[in-house]
Amino acid sequence: MQKFPMTVEGAETLRNEIHDLKTVQRPQVIAAIAEAREHGDLKENAEYHAAREQQGFIEARLADYEARLSNAQIIDVKAIEPTGKVIFGTTITMLNLDTDKEVTYKIVGEHEANVKQGLISLTSPIARALIGKEEGDEVRIETPGGVQLYEILTVEHI
């Protein structure tokens, strides 16, 4: 089975989600199902059907998160000697040479990506353009709005 890269923070977030699903959300929905059963006829009991549907969502999310975690190759970038090269898990600050604006991205696994938080997937066009580059390099990145030119200012293992 192929392993997928994941940061230590991404793995911790998944573990916390799994813990919440098992210890908070699952017991709540089980209690809601039990309470709805006490109300009698299950065929026309909307609370019962809603709780059962919610239980299905929780179990599906739990199975998905556990599968992601078991298929993860957890990479701790802090344990890797910094070389100034862009690799998985590094945080890159770049200067857009057209707009003079700085942007910062961290390269993470696919399931961890959140562009609004500056977390970009290893498989994204930006990350693919950056991997292997070094501080001081100029990088051309294809975006939906056209080609953008960036200079890599810093590559950090944080």
Image: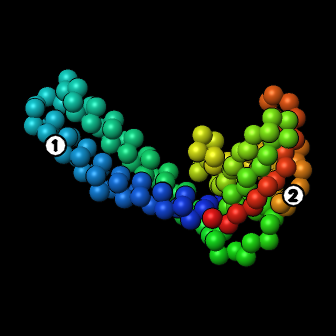
SS under mark 1: helix
Q: Which amino acid lies under the numbered mark 1 shown in the image of this protein?
A: Ala
- Point out residue 90 in the picture as x, y percentages from the top left corner: 70, 61
In the orientation shown, which residue stands out farthest toward the front? 100
Relative horizontal placement of residue 121, taking residue 111 as reference (left or right): right
**Amino acid under disc 2:** Gly
Give residue 58's quadrant in the image.
top left
Residue at point 82%, 53% (across, down): 152
Question: Residue at 77% across / 49% down in the picture?
Answer: 94
Q: How is the image coloured?
A: rainbow
Q: Nearer the viewer, residue 156 or 17?
A: 156
Expressed as whole percent of the image width and height from the top left, the position of residue 87 reads 76, 62
Q: Is residue 14 above or below residue 57?
A: below
The residue beneath circle 1 is 34
Task: State the quadrant of the C terminus.
Answer: bottom right
- Percent x, y for residue 103? 71, 45
Tell which tag, 2 or 1, sits nearer the viewer: 2
Task: Residue at 16% x, 35% y: name it.
Answer: 36
Check the image and report above or below for 31 versus 13. above
Residue occupying the point 60% across, 67% down: 74
SS at badge 2: loop
Q: Which residue in the protein does label 2 denote?
A: 136
At which x and y percent is residue 7?
A: 60, 62
Indicate which disc, 2 or 1, sits on the residue closer to the N terminus. Answer: 1
Q: Quadrant of residue 56?
A: top left
Label 1 Cα crowd, 10 Å radius (few <14 / some 14-19 / many 20+):
few
Q: CA distance from mark 2 to mark 1?
A: 62 Å
The N terminus: image quadrant? bottom right
Task: Look at the image and tell me whether residue 141 can be seen.
Answer: no
Residue 149 in the image: above or below residue 10:
above
Q: Quadrant of residue 81?
A: bottom right
Q: Nearer the viewer, residue 43 or 112?
A: 112
